[in-house]
Amino acid sequence: MPLVYKRIVKFFVFLGITSLLFWLVYRNQNWSEAEKILKEDVDYTWIWVAIGMGLLSHLCRALRWQLLTRSMGYNIRLANSFMGVMIGYLANIALPRMGEFTRCGVVSKYERVPFSKLFGTVVAERVFDLGILVALTLVVVFTQFKQIGIFLEDNREVEEKIVSFFHSSWFFVFAVGLVLALYIVWRLLRKTSFHERLRNFWQGMKEGLLTVKRVKHKWLFVFYSLFIWLMYYLMFYVCFFCFEFTSDLGALIALTIFVLSSYGMVMPAQGGIGSWHAMVIAALLVYLPHTPGIENMCRTFALLTHGTMTLLYIVVGAFCLLIMPLYNTKSLKKQE
């Protein structure tokens, strides 16, 4: 099958997954009530604050990428680094994980840096970002045990279902079946080209980490990484102040829901649509279990917050996609 057809098939497969997830989350949504909340009960000042923080995080990501490429002897322009990052986010809305390839492709074209080397730096970023996410997850786990216990006490039926599952024969069957399935898949993949691709991926991760080791200003790299995640978190947290029912939840609860929502972005759904919403709504229901009409309000909160981020990626990403060829044409003329 030609590559273009494969991409079309992938697009529609992921679109189907995304549509199904979104439908499952919002099938019982009262849309007239959601419209009323969005018109009358939202303080949109905080949305603009969130957008500003989002742009700061993306600018910082561009600066961090520029720092990594300098360690390999390439000095990419900040404008191209930023536009590449935003075009990558735009591509992720079309196809999950396509953003990394697109970002490296457009910058490689205009900065004349080998694609493989740029991709190695992106892998390095991902490894470092994963480390930060794991650290945040541990913070959340150790600080939220009490709240999980309170939720299970208030929802005995949930606790009983969890306990009965782990004590049932079905759990044993599921565990054994999962181990056998993973073993069979591993044995089959060893004989395919996918196994070689997986080995190359791990090799790329090692090379990416070596790129970080070669960075001259390591503390600046760490600062950029922490600042990116701080802005991500604050971009999410300030949206709590848009709604009265979330405004008093606090920074630690916001961190917990933010971490869970980050895992929602890992799902094979375009732009995290559906999976991100599901994680945020489920987490909010843990902290606000007895609030009247809470499910509709939580769904509306997730819709607005995710919609803000997605709209930012679409508008700025599309603008960068249009302006990047013009910017680089003018730059080349000046050099000549």
Image (cartoon, helix red, strand yellow):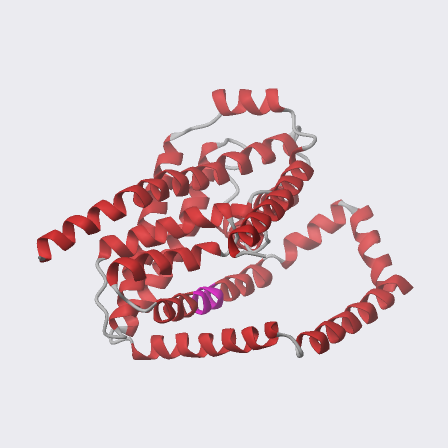
The answer to whether residue 168 of the structure is visible from this angle is: no
The answer to whether residue 227 of the structure is visible from this angle is: yes
In this view, the residue in front, 19 or 217, is 19
In this view, the residue in front, 219 or 313, is 313
Q: Quadrant of the C terminus?
A: bottom left
Residue visible at 42% across and 49% down in the picture: 89
Residue 79 left/right relative to 331: right
Q: Residue furthest front?
A: 2
Q: Which stretch is magenta?
A: 126-132
Quarter residue 81 falls in: bottom left
Counting the numbered discs, the total is 0
Residue visible at 39% across and 40% down in the picture: 312
In this view, the residue in front, 290 or 281, is 281
* Residue 181 falls within the magenta-colored stretch: no
Residue 322: x %, y % from top left: 30, 42
Residue 168 left/right relative to 222: right
Residue 162: x %, y % from top left: 80, 56
Residue 166: x %, y % from top left: 83, 63
